[in-house]
Image (cartoon, rainbow, N blue to C red):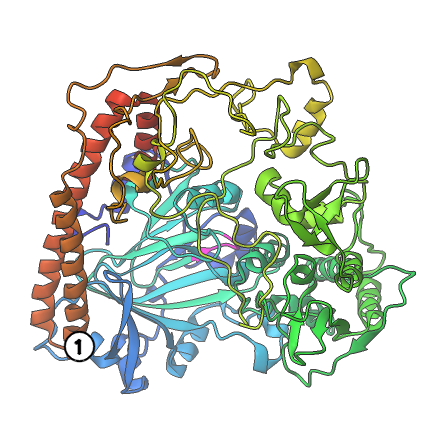
Amino acid sequence: MEFSQSNIPSAQDLLRSGELFVPFSEFPVQTIYETTGWFERKLQEGKPFVIRGLNQLDCWDAPTLNNGCLVTSSSSGAIPVRNCQTGRDVRMRLRDLIPTDHTRAGHVRESLYAKDLQCPAEWIRALKAVLPSCLMQLGSFDLFRVLPKEITPEVLMAYVGTQLSLSGFHRCFSGTVALNLMVESEGSRYGSLCFGTDQASQEKYDLFMEGLGKSSHTDWANISIAQMKTANFPIYVTHQEPGDLVIFPSATAHQIWNVSSMVTKVVWNIMHASSIPSFFNYIQPVYQKQCHADTGRVPLIPIHALRDSSHNPEETKLLVDMLQQLVDDEDTGCDSSVPIKLVDTQGAVVECNFCGLTIWNRHLHCEQCGDFDLCLTCYVSGRSCKHVGDYTWAELFRSEYCRSLIKTARDRLGSYSASDIGRPKQKTLGAIALVAVEARRQSSERLCHLCRDSHPVWKGITCSQCSAFFCYRGLYRHFDINLLRFLRNEIPWVCPKCSQICNCRCCHFSRPYQSKDKPIRARIKPVDPRGRIAGFVDNVFDQKRGKRAVTITQSASPQSTLEPRGQKRPRTPNNDGHERSLHEAVDSSESVDSSQIRRSHIVTDVDVPHSLPMRGSSTGSFNSKGQLRISDLVEDRSPPDKSFHRSPHVQDHIPLSSTPDNTAYRYPHEPKNPNENILNPIDEENILSLERKLGSLRQYADGLLELSLIDSHAKVLDKISSLEAQIERKRRQKAELLFSGLNRDFPDLADIAMEEARRRGL
């Protein structure tokens, strides 16, 4: 928890501070009844907004929409309740979380959040009396209504949160529109503080979350005010009180902080027509890459929706275009005679056993496993079970049936026909999968030019000019290829070596391609453990957790100028300091004069005997990308290597830095006391000891809470807060000492570390 009751600002305070905070658009409740088409226009704008005062309507049923009704209609058993301080769930009864007697009403239990509770039937009837159909779940704007009842997602839920509980920044599942209605709030302050983003800032938000080491689509991250101020996109903020309905359009992110002592809400999602393109073009590729299951069954919506004629013309056009795109992309080619088996699912849903995606039609089926299916995207990405060459084609609908649905829908629209303008000519996913099926049945292997290892031929591609073989994993790792976009390309491929941009250990071109960092993140795991063969680009990282910066600097030599045999020259940025894309590098390489190709000299400053056991990365670099992370300085917990002893032949380390052009090197003066910046190991032990004590206290706190020992739980929480503050002070002291030493000895690295510290809110 990065905030407390005393330091939570109000929405007005944040808006007055300027920065990037902007207000939500606010509308009175009469707007949704008096203005035709108003709600749909606001969703198309892609900005969050709030409707005030639903509880002021005469039809608002206050005796029903309250905590008492929720407790009465809920089961008496224990439910999982998230402790937002510890990040773990505890089990307790809802009546203990929401005390109704006066003897316990004064006890404040902080940071508890009960989510996804079954919404009482009485509440649903009361909401239908207040809200128009377009705002309701399975209403006139919700495309989930076209799915069969047995597979329709359950998205109408009740939430109960105590003071300082929260929902971190996240996007709602499958690109749906999120609606958040506050029913009741206790306490003198407003109920909740809401933050949101808009659709125009999607890419910037993605980069912002990636800088924090989080996935912008699948992770929930509590972002502090200090971290929000470092964003380069607008952050919308508003307060929420009982009767306020806050709405977040499709694919926008939001975060909620509950401020009052008790907050009760109803939360639901709708699949608006504007959510369909967002899902297929923006969200689904990320879900497939990260193996995040689609709980909304969105791929089934277009074909089920076109079976009836109850949609307005604009909605029908969108669904026709989307189904046409899906049918065209799974086409294997007019000259293909591949047998495709029709599968009768008997109403069941077919899911990809690797990424969890709902399969709407064509897929690959493993004959050996019997019940293992892969979507086309996973198959062409190299994923499979252990039976790599035993896949056959299957489909849920004949392509003739799908095309007849499209034709019927177009006839209802009159002269409407889809436009292919702006759609690039490329291979279909079905055609790529057809080639992959045949390739996987071959047993031949080739040596990869990049990794110098042998691979089956289906794991890479051959250059059209020099016949060199490059594995897909290496192309992604070293040249940042987008695999599907790369495979869809119909132009004969020219390898990086022929384009004179190869950055492997053997090629020494003057302008090699500068690959982008691929930071550590959660490992990709298949939803079915039988998916043993990972994809070509799965789990490729440049950094490792716990890597120590101080040990990496010890791998250089004190000799003045050395050109080791087989040593790769350091990469140099282009003149403007920006990284070049692969295509830009290919274009620019044509003008490179061969006389400019040269081997650069590597300067090292410490002589390390070959017999010494060394740790760290390659010679002369701080990590694989030459950057220093703040976690290397503050969060390192790896034990020291007791087997390493300083050799009398090893001189004190002399820091090395260079000019921006990497053409000259300078040696700063040595500090008067070489050991003055070395951390005291006792301080490090104190931090670890305090963290162990903190973990034990959190376990005790959960146990006390399960037993409903509220007073004891509150005292343990006070002790936890004290320990957290003590640990934070020690970490800051450690960081300040490191920054001070870096600023004196390595000014360029100090700037990098301090900038990252500011970006992370440290």
Please check the rendered image and state whether residue 694 is part of the magenta-colored stretch, yes or no: no
Q: Give the percent coordinates (x, y) of residue 572.
A: 53, 23
Q: Quadrant of residue 743?
A: top left
For label 1, the crowd category at 10 Å Cα-Cα, with few meaning under 14, some 14 to 19 and many 20 or more, is some
Task: Say what secondary structure mark 1 lies in.
Answer: loop
Q: Name the residue under label 1.
A: 99
User: Is residue 142 or residue 593 the one in the foreground?
Assistant: 593
Name the residue located 47 percent from the left edge and 71 percent from the top edge.
155
Residue 637 lies, with reference to residue 603, above or below; the image says below
Judged left or right of residue 703, residue 236 is right
Name the residue type under label 1. Pro
The quadrant of the rendering that contains the C terminus is top left
User: Is residue 685 or residue 93 the one in the foreground?
Assistant: 685
Residue 727 visible at all: yes
Residue 536 lies, with reference to residue 623, above or below; the image says below
Judged left or right of residue 63, residue 616 is right
Q: Give the range drawn in magenta.
A: 247-251
Q: Give the percent coordinates (x, y) of residue 536.
A: 62, 53
The quadrant of the rendering that contains the N terminus is bottom left
Q: Quadrant of residue 147?
A: bottom right
Residue 59 visible at all: no
Name the residue located 79 percent from the left edge and 78 percent from the top edge.
342
